[in-house]
Amino acid sequence: MNKHYSEPGEPGKSSPYYSQWQGGGGHRQPEQERRPYHFSEQGEHGQPGFPPTQPAYPGSQGPRQNDIPVYQSTPPADVFVPRSGGKKPRRRRTRRGCVIGCLIPLLLVLILFVFAFSTFQKVLAFGRVISTKDPLSTQTNYVGGSDRINFLLMGYGGSGHDGAFLTDSLVIISMLPQSHHTTLISIPRDLWVQNPADSGSYSRINAVYPVAAGETNARPIEGGDTLAQKVSLITGLQINYWMTINFAGFKDFIDAIGGVDVTVPTSFTAQYPANDDPKINPNWIKVKFAKGPQHMDGNKAIVYARARYVLNNASEGSDFARSQRQQLIMKAALTKIKDWHTWPQMFGAMDKLEKTLYSNFSLADLAQFALKMDLNEAHRAGLSNQNVLEDTFSDDGQAILLPQGNNWSLIPTYIQQQLYR
């Protein structure tokens, strides 16, 4: 029986390349040259694009090494066959990119938390320095309710000045929390009162604080409480809360917040101590203020608030006029603090305020009180020789102020008429 078996290297008759071989001996005819990786136009079952599926050699399981690769009708999963118009497969995102993307917002939140926490701690520390009360406590339900709150503001020159703790500036801030209606009432420094109470001794009212607090201000709480009680007795207002302001420190505070903007209501020229104290420097300088808006640094603002020896405008030389100027400076400073552009500077400003302010109001109550009082629409009043007071002299010859006819009941009656309701 003549059976033909393929030898190694010779294709079988079933091979698609059998027709390319002629005769024995395995010699290839030159009329058609074999192209090693040429596939037929049609694969098995007429499927285009793939070679036939049968083994290249009878009895073999697949192509020999270095021979023609044989594919199934469907290419293996690990073989990429591009299609016309198809897209390349996407690269899988690495876990590293996802982790970094998650860490960045987490780090930002952590940084903000640390900053907020450190800021909060600094604010609390500031509140403990400037007040006799816990910073977050309240004595007024955080300035809520309908009851009027009366707050006494006392300003003195500070260490290094003659009469360092004489309260030359006395202003009552009376406010209704629900309506924000605010009244500013100035008390002249020359008002003649008994000091200490029930002692039979008298002095100007600006000496009440240093007598109670001591010449070196060793007892500031006693000084503040004593003066608040004295002003309550004179005005008929219940004054439970007070704050002292050191003018020297207030000057530094104004510089720390970049100065203040003040609209000067009337022009004047005054003589002023070259060093704010003639006993330190006996020389005097002339200071001039023109009517209209002005930007003032700390030194100019304090000179404007305290100038008393006016040369060309007598009305500006009175205690009442000086109190009005001090109110303008306080309003300008508060307006600057409320401006969010100033907030980045408040860290440095708080360091200055620690040496400037002291109060029996908690920090939380102070903040609420400052936010609620309306200085733009406030009613301004003051005790002066233009209403219920008169100029006179003490037994030892000092120029003082007393109620007209020595009738002290005129003062509370007048103040009740001036309150913004």
Image (spheres, rainbow, N blue to C red):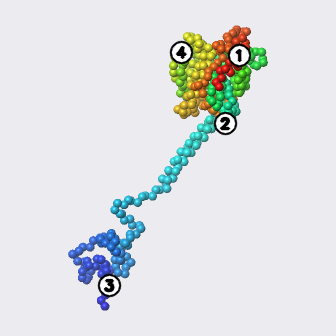
Q: CA distance from mark 2 to mark 3?
A: 104 Å
Q: CA distance from mark 1 to mark 3?
A: 140 Å
Under mark 2, the amino acid is Leu
Which residue in the protein does label 3 denote? 5
Disc on the earlier residue, 4 or 2? 2
Asked if labels 1 and 4 touch by Cβ distance under 8 angstroms, the answer is: no
Label 4, secondary structure: give it: loop
Residue at 66% across / 36% down in the picture? 136
Instruction: Kindly indicate the quadrant of the structure image that contains residue 280.
Output: top right
Which residue in the protein does label 2 denote? 136
Q: Is residue 182 visible?
A: yes
Q: Residue 175: x percent and y percent?
A: 65, 27
Quadrant of the snapshot with the N terminus? bottom left
Under mark 4, the amino acid is Ser
Disc on the earlier residue, 2 or 1? 2
Which residue in the protein does label 4 denote? 267
Q: CA distance from mark 4 to mark 1?
A: 33 Å
Quadrant of the snapshot with the C terminus? top right
Q: Tell whether 111 sits left or right of 215.
A: left
